[in-house]
Image: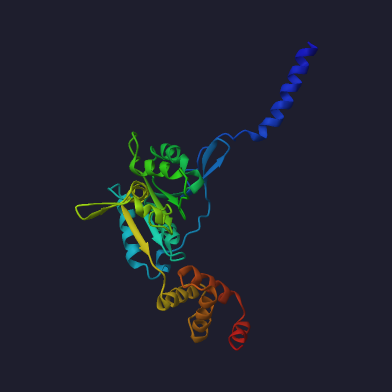
Amino acid sequence: MQQLEAFLARAEALMARLEPLLPPARPEPDWQATAFRWRRQGLAGWLEAVPDPHTLPLARLTHIDRQLALLVRNTRQFVKGKPANNVLLTGARGTGKSSLIKALLPEFADKGLRLVEVDKGHLADLHDIMALLADRKERFILFCDDLSFEEGDDAYKALKTALDGGLARRADNVLVYATSNRRHLIPEKMSENREGWVRDGEIHPGEATEEKVSLSDRFGLWLSFYPFDQDAYLAAVKEWLSHFGLGMDDEAERAALQWSQLRGSRSGRVAWQFANDWAGRPAKERKAELGK
């Protein structure tokens, strides 16, 4: 009896030490939510509802009219149950790629659209995520932000399978919208150009290049975003100042240009950051700084 009690005591102590390391039970998603993020702890992953998602009206996004129109058209087809494409948004930083995807939620949430944010480190779980969503009546966009892969990173293989489907049929109610500063998502090296070969006067890329291009090729729709010129930047500043109830006078324009010069960049993000600074300071302080 004493040996049994000692054994049970040791087992209880061992369980107390192991319990914090064990993954939590997977909670049932709150399907009333419109936005989710995929969370992981240990071996367990689950959908966590985002009660107050960060979104903005599509009208706030300036100088990306063509990209906006194409993405809205694709998303409208999707929520109507019609054929639609996975989308890759690439180009200059701060030009509205992520904001454009997030702005789709208030536009289409009442039509059944749901947004699921998936971190790059969790791409290996895409099969599990899609299996969880496949039987739902809602339409889900898996949002992968700032996506890129380094040399030797195999996570892109899970993404390739999710985009094209492996042996299992791809879920009809799930699309992937990804943003990246790289068109092909994977770094391209000068040495890979030497792998190319010529036949009948035509240049054919080498195997390494083909492998990298094959990932971005699985996105049916590519949207490119370009750096803002001065007019586009000032238009974005004007839009964000109006968001704070301010007008765009000569003082604000001069300050906005100085702000972009200090940042070494003109973009919608820089315009938003300037508007936050300008709107948050007293008028006297703003004028005093311009007078220096």
Q: Give percent across and percent down for residue 285.
A: 63, 82
Residue nearest the viewer, comparing 270 with 194: 194
Q: Residue furthest right?
A: 2
Residue at 44% across, 75% down: 233
Q: Give percent across and percent down for residue 194.
A: 35, 53
Residue at 75% across, 22% down: 10
**Res. 27 visible in picture:** no
Q: Across the whole image, how many numbered discs are drawn on residues?
A: 0
Looking at the rendered image, the quarter that the N terminus falls into is: top right
Residue at 36% across, 51% down: 111
Image color mode: rainbow
Picture quadrant of residue 97: bottom left
Looking at the rendered image, the quarter that the C terminus falls into is: bottom right
Picture quadrant of residue 103: bottom left
Question: Would residue 46 appear left or right of 74 to someone viewing this image?
Answer: right
Against 46, residue 120 (above or below) is: below
Q: Residue furthest top?
A: 1
Against 156, residue 280 (above or below) is: below
Residue nearest the viewer, comparing 49 with 160: 160
Q: Residue furthest left?
A: 200
Q: Give percent across and percent down for residue 190.
A: 40, 57
Q: Give percent across and percent down for residue 163.
A: 36, 44
Question: Would residue 196 appear left or right of 28 to someone viewing this image?
Answer: left
**Res. 162 visible in picture:** yes
Q: Residue furthest bottom?
A: 291
